[in-house]
Image (cartoon, rainbow, N blue to C red):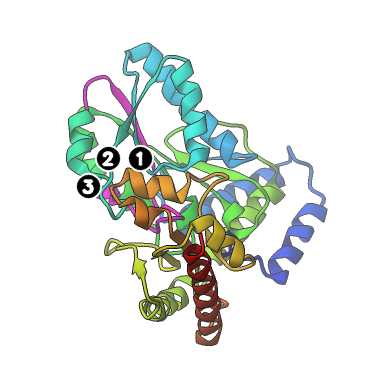
Amino acid sequence: MSAFFHPLSEQLLEKKHLFEKHQIAPDSLEAKKLIEAGYERIKQTLKAPKNAVISMMPSLQQALFRVYDHVFENAIKTGKTYILVPQTMPRLLLEKLEKLEKRGCILHFIKCHKDGTIDLEDLEKHLSYRTSLVTLCLADPLLGTIQEIKKIQEKLAPLDILLHVDVTYAIGKFDIDLKHIEADFVTFSLEAINSPHHAIVIGKELLEERMFYHDVQFFDTALYAAVHSECALSCALLRNYFVKQLNMIEGCSIFSHPPLSLPNCVIASFLGCDQEALLYLLEGLDASIGNGPFQDLKDMLLNIGHPFAFARSSLSFQLSEKMTKDSIDNLIEKIKCAVEKLRRASCHL
């Protein structure tokens, strides 16, 4: 899964060490000013509303726990215990939601179209006066799908339902404007650029004690570098070339992305090949079948309506800004060799 990550430059790592070595008393006025300045720059980078409040957490898991715990407290007071979740929700977030379910909340899964976008009609069917929260990811790192948050928000506004959006895997991939997202809670972690495992919650109130000033300053610096990288443009150009080359492989089918999707993600299915065997033969390349913090790719594709033959032979490829057409050509040759080897082997079974 390495291509999900933007490696930090040596200059950023040097700044990290400087922040950590710079001796300022944590409770001093100077430290508080540095923290406030860092938070303001983070809001500017993500185009957050001026009245937004930032809370920094030690990890994304902690950030999700605090958001969902806040929702649970409101649910107990109001009796609004329904939480709506898309079928494609990453496992990391589902695990936190399942803990709420054990405490009395009720999870409802919303159907998604074949391209991974939320079915707005199914969402509307599940909305009621008992619904407290809709929680989702802005971008799915395996499918490459980007959700239409504005349309979802329009469905929720009349019923006073909270919206939580995690933007972790959208950072640096396309322009994020939190003024247009209009979510009650936005979470993200800079694990996606190999930053320290801190996370941010942007909302309307403070959920956690703030971190040390050097954590905030480094987070701000790393975020700015990721958002202003040229990854999105370079990956979008490479993806078109990669898809063109994949289509020349016999029996290869490409996942149909929605018009708005991550520029570095391509899902391809190779007829007659088992995805796990293919991934093993392509070890070391930037391909994935899910697991870890994500759902299994095969299960996700089956859940959103793709045939078993397509799902069982699919891989999610992640392009990086360091790739060139030559490296794409080398990747294609390795894929061809692996596919031919598996198809020959299957003939003898």
Residue drawn at 53 percent across, 63 percent down = 278
State the residue at coordinates (75%, 56%): 19
Q: Circle 3 sits in a helix, a strand or a loop, which is it?
A: helix
Q: Residue furthest front?
A: 348
Residue for badge 1: 87
Q: In this picture, is 315 found above or below 72?
A: below
Residue type highlighted by circle 2: Lys
In depth, the one of 67 and 217 nearer the eye is 67
Residue 121 screen position, x and y as percent: 17, 40
Q: Residue 109 appears at what percent x and percent y?
A: 32, 33
The residue mark sitting in front, 1 or 3, is 1
Badge 1: few (under 14), some or many (20 or more) residues near its Cα, within 10 Å?
many
**Mark 1: amino acid:** Gln
The circle drawn on residue 111 is 2
In the image, the segment drawn in magenta is 127-150
Q: Is residue 136 magenta?
A: yes
Q: Is residue 337 magenta?
A: no
Identify the residue at horizontal 37%, vertical 81% (top origin): 248
The amino acid beneath tag 3 is: Lys
Q: Is residue 59 left or right of residue 110?
A: right
Are the two marked residues, 2 and 1, in contact with CB atoms closer than 8 angstroms? yes
Q: Earlier in the sequence, mark 1 or mark 3?
A: 1
Which of the two labelled residues, at mark 2 and mark 1, occupies the earlier sequence position?
Answer: 1
Residue 5 x/y as whole percent = 58, 61
* Distance in Å between CA atoms under marks 1 and 3: 18 Å
Question: Disc 3 designates what residue?
Answer: 151
Quarter of image, res 88: top left
